[in-house]
Image (cartoon, rainbow, N blue to C red):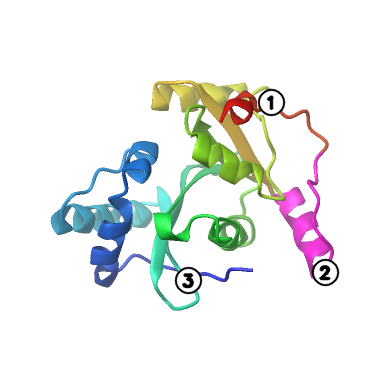
Amino acid sequence: MARVRLIEHDEKYAERLLALSSHIEIQRALGLYVKTRADILAYICQMREQEQQGKVVSRVILNEHAEPIGVTTLMLFDHAKKHCHIATWLGQPYWHKGYNQASKDEILNLAFYELGMKIVFSGIRASNHRSCNSQIKLPYICLDLAREFPEVHEMLEAKEGEPCLLNGFMESDFRLYQARASRNNVAEHPRDREVYWPQIVMA
């Protein structure tokens, strides 16, 4: 399985992150439009400032060779309800190689065990078929949470301005997955939910 390490943002990774984030699908999915070194440095500065203000926890993802391959960020914290949202992007050369789950394992460890979150929402635009396919492969994902958390779903769609799917990760499910994995068993989907995934059929 792919192995990653999460580190705080650093200007020394600016050039590599700029190159990776220039892929059109990444820019469209995230609304992250950086074209110059100044743009990516401004992005890094913004992430640092927002983390100091307690608004985000953002980390650069390094692969086994200590190369930056993407970014994963926790944001929109509701400490009273103990939930937040996650956004992750990986450079195109690192798609379909196990890095998505590896980075999720690490950032969810931080969210649940260090920050005390109980739910980490992962909302995506319904039109983003690539992210839909990536999420459904995660063994501890909870699909179609819109009916259970309608106010969160409404906020997400208002923010994005288009139809969205609301998925997420529960602390209890993540603990169950880790317990099963530690026994060298294949972790099956931990929750018996009705899955609503119309876009996958047509993707």
- In which quarter of the view is residue 152 placed? top right
Q: Which residue sits at x=66%, y=47%?
A: 137
Asked if the magenta segment contains residue 36, the reply would be no
Q: Which residue is mark 2?
A: 184
Between 174 and 92, the one lying in front of the other is 92
Describe the element under mark 3 as helix, strand or loop. loop
**Residue most toward the front?**
202
Residue 180, labelled with which disc?
none
Task: Specify whether residue 26 is in view.
Answer: yes
Q: Which residue sits at x=75%, y=62%?
A: 178
Q: Amino acid at mark 1?
A: Tyr
Q: Which residue sits at x=70%, y=39%?
A: 142
Part of the protein shown in magenta: 171-191
Q: Amino acid at mark 2?
A: Asn
Describe the element under mark 2 as helix, strand or loop. loop
Q: Position of residue 136 (x, y in %)?
A: 65, 42
